């Protein structure tokens, strides 16, 4: 994996590697969080993994890896209101852009097509944005457009203003039944910025700004001591532990789930050679994503925690 991404987001890189090798990667992926530059780098890294002609290693210099690093690969496209645009609309991803994407995916291709949907502009960057840009450039990837003078291409999260529901809906059928070798990636600040019909058909991953977020896993680790065997007799205990930790520290339940998800990602890393275990961890991670969706649908956290704990007991 790419060194910058690997340092901070190895859990996600490992997850994608496992998913690709098991052929379980969803055709639609949402990366969400505050730092859209790092999401953009992760999207390109995923595109590289999917297209590498060798073994996908970070230093590979095959033609596909090279083109993707230079952001010039014909099958890896950034779709924003200013990228891959052949019409006059200025503020939105247009219907015409989506139609062009659809045309592309129905013609045959020797490559794995990756469409990265985001919002973007060319602008002067603030100090924080400059740091994010430098971090992005350190990943070895280029932006899709050169800047001008002191301005630089800057990605932000997609939302209902720049990606209007009627346009987004035109993609739905292809997201549901995509042609082979096609992956859609959406970058957002918040999953709620995307229409629900896309969210429900996608795998969503939170990319925390690693500068600010730490995950505590110590308060629940004892329940995983015999993992993958998760003792049915401890389910209620486990739920109580989560509720207690949440209320004592005044936390959002989604943060508690993120801590568990982070723990599972770490397990994935340390058990990457064990095919059986990787499958189980992978399913459990998917379940934590479903738990977060349940919380977003206003289901009570004790119900969500219990449902999750029961799921863990399945081998
Ligand atoms: Zn390669």
Image (spheres, rainbow, N blue to C red):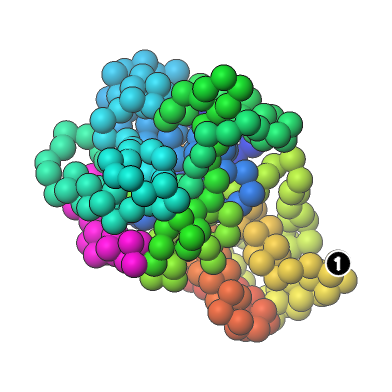
Question: In this rendering, would 250 be left or right of 254?
Answer: right
Identify which residue, 211 or 155, lies in the foreground.
155
Question: In this rendering, would 83 be left or right of 251?
Answer: left
Q: Residue beneath label 1, please?
A: 249
Identify which residue, 173 or 5, lies in the foreground.
173
In the displayed image of the protein, which residue is found farthest to the left?
A: 108
Q: Return the x and y of residue 210 as percentages of the image width and height.
A: 69, 42
What residue lies at 41% left-to-right and 53% top-to-bottom?
92
Q: Return the x and y of residue 308 as percentages of the image width and height.
A: 57, 73
Occupied quadrant, residue 63 = top left
Placement of 3 over or under 14, stated as above or below: above
Would residue 31 be visible to someone looking at this image? no
Would residue 70 be visible to someone looking at this image? yes
Question: In this rendering, would 219 be left or right of 270?
Answer: right
Occupied quadrant, residue 71 = top left
In the displayed image of the protein, which residue is found farthest to the front?
A: 88
- Whether residue 37 appears in magenta in the rendering, the answer is no
Q: Return the x and y of residue 108 as percentages of the image width and height.
A: 12, 41
Q: Return the x and y of residue 290 as percentages of the image width and height.
A: 51, 69
Identify which residue, 52 or 159, lies in the foreground.
159
In the displayed image of the protein, which residue is found farthest to the top?
A: 61
Helix, strand or loop under label 1: loop
Occupied quadrant, residue 11 = top right
Placement of 295 over or under 222, stated as above or below: below
Q: What is the magenta range?
A: 166-183
What residue lies at 57% left-to-right and 19% top-to-bottom?
149
């Amino acid at each position: 994996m790419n060194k910058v991404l690997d340092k901070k987001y190895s859990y996600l890189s490992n997850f994608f590697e496992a998913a690709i090798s098991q052929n379980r990667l969803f055709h639609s992926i949402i990366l969400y969080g505050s730092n859209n530059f790092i999401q953009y780098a992760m999207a390109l890294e995923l595109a590289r993994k999917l297209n590498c002609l060798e073994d996908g290693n970070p230093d590979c210099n095959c033609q596909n890896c090279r083109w993707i690093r230079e952001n010039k690969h014909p099958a890896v496209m950034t779709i924003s209101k200013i990228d891959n645009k052949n019409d006059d609309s200025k503020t939105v991803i247009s219907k015409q852009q989506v139609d062009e994407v659809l045309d592309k995916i129905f013609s045959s291709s020797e490559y794995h097509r990756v469409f990265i949907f985001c919002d973007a502009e060319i602008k002067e960057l603030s100090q924080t944005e400059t740091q994010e840009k430098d971090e992005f450039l350190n990943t070895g990837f280029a932006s899709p457009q050169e800047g001008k003078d002191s301005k630089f291409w800057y990605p932000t999260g997609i939302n209902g203003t720049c990606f209007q529901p009627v346009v987004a809906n035109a993609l739905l059928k292809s997201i549901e039944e995509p042609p082979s070798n096609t992956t859609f990636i959406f970058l957002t600040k918040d999953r709620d910025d995307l229409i629900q019909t896309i969210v429900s058909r996608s795998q969503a991953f939170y990319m925390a700004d690693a500068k600010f977020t730490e995950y505590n896993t110590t308060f629940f680790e004892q329940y995983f001591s015999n993992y993958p065997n998760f003792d049915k007799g401890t389910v209620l205990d486990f739920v109580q532990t989560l509720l207690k930790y949440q209320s004592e520290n005044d936390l959002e339940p989604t943060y508690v789930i993120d801590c568990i998800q982070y723990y599972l990602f770490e397990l994935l890393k340390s058990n990457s050679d064990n095919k059986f275990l990787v499958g189980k961890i992978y399913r459990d991670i998917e379940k934590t994503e479903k738990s977060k969706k349940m919380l977003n649908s206003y289901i009570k956290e004790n119900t969500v925690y219990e449902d999750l704990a029961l799921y863990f007991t399945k081998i």
